[in-house]
Image (tube, helix red, strand yellow):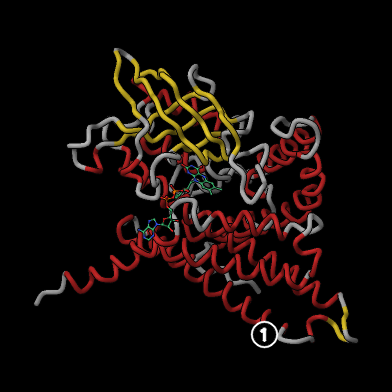
Amino acid sequence: MNMTFGMRDENRALLDRVKTMIRDDIMPLADEYAEEIAKGDRWQFTERQTEILEGLKSKAKEQGLWNFWLTDSAAGFGLTTVEYAYFAEEMGKTPLGAEVFNCSAPDTGNMEVLERYGSARMKETWLKPLLDGQIRSAYLMTEPAVASSDATNISMSCVRDGDDYVLNGEKWWSSGAGDPRCKVYITMVKTGSDDMPKHQQHSMIVVPAGTPGIEILRAMEVYGHDDAPHGHMHIRFTDVRVPAENLILGEGRGFEISQGRLGPGRIHHCMRAIGQAEAALEQMCRRALNREAFGKKLAQLGANYDIMAECRMEIEMARLLCLKAAWYMDQGDARAAAPWISQIKVVAPRTALKVIDEAVQMFGGQGVSQDTKLAQTWTHVRTLRLADGPDAVHRRQIARAELKKYTQEKM
Ligand SMILES: Cc1cc2nc3c(=O)[nH]c(=O)nc-3n(C[C@H](O)[C@H](O)[C@H](O)COP(=O)(O)OP(=O)(O)OC[C@H]3O[C@@H](n4cnc5c(N)ncnc54)[C@H](O)[C@@H]3O)c2cc1C
């Protein structure tokens, strides 16, 4: 029996259908899909790659298994964040999982922004094709020249000129901007002057990919991997003109929007990381039972029982914390949820990294090779200790929330 507390009965059946599709349709094609990426120009899709991906997406869509992440919207299933956690965990178990159900980063966060804060025109032009899975998007905040974990440092200039804004500056680590299907960037820019309140100097603007003046300089590598065709791109903007109506909500509202965006996005990453940890523990156990050394199964050697038990306990603790953070999000008070999201944002990648590393060890040399997905998964999860806020920044938030309890005490 699987624990699914917080899940309504009707959604249990839906989760089972997602699990079945992942097991029967997606996982069997994962290796072939990865091999296709390696062929020819890795930044373009081969015919077969498109066939696999679009075939799976159509199948998911036909079955109504689509856009689960839209938790509180009429367009989605109306899942709670707690319920969505169980779905995201399953999708995290295979690299294609999230995209097949149109639930992948950074699109979900960007769609959330457009849905909550976008104008009718933005919704028609960008949200609709994103919800349909026809295009993809990127979120451009981080900049090479400034410490971007403090987003008040963001410095890309955005100056009003007639009916346009003109953007200048550089962004990097723009995940997904390498994908030829990426048609739009949600971009954090500086519209205000230094003498304005710190959190009112920035804005978010919708920039169509391919606008004149945009140059993709290079793909940033993660431990030597460029993550093609998704990519984490380094992009230069030189006098990029964007219609003024592309500014979301108005000047100075960037932080308000980014808070709305990053909460759900962060927790989705954590949910998938727990799925990745589960998948690694399963591989570790199967390997430990199927291989022998010194006359015994690997499971029976050395401290391997303890290692597997520790991994199981840590995953369970991380999952419960994730569900607690999700529950806080469902209460509708983003401020109260924030320290819980920060806690899981530190704990989930740390747990997943530990479990994946132990699985690598159980596989011996094969564990670090291309013959399992473990090495690739480890490098991906390692980046989560930086992306969407480095650990230290989240620990700072957790400690501040903790101390506030006592500094606000009446003496
Ligand atoms: C694979 C990957 C994908 C990414 N995708 C995106 C994306 O799609 N869009 C996007 O905009 N960005 C993206 N990022 C960027 C990511 O969000 C930033 O790297 C992150 O916010 C940190 O900013 P920085 O790199 O400028 O580090 P810095 O701000 O320079 O921080 C460096 C280090 O300083 C230390 N530090 C910072 N603040 C504190 C503190 N308060 N206390 C103690 N120590 C501190 C931490 O150790 C931190 O890691 C991605 C990054 C990676 C690696």
Question: Which residue position holds label 1?
Answer: 306
- The x, y position of residue 57, in whole percent, is 69, 39
Against 355, residue 174 (above or below) is above
Say above or below: 175 vs 410. above
Horizontal side, residue 190 vs residue 210: left or right: left
Which image quadrant for residue 73?
A: top left
Query: Residue 118's x, y, as percent?
Result: 38, 31
* Element type where label 1 sits in the image: helix
- Mark yes or no: residue 107 visible: no
Q: Which residue sits furthest top?
A: 162
Instruction: Say which quarter of the image contains residue 312.
Output: bottom right
- Residue at position x 24%, y 32% from top? 192
Q: Amino acid at mark 1?
A: Asp
Residue 248, located in which quarter of the rendered image? top left
Q: Report the quarter where the C terminus lies.
A: bottom left
Residue 208, horizontal then vertical, whole percent: 49, 24
Residue placed farthest to the right in the image? 295
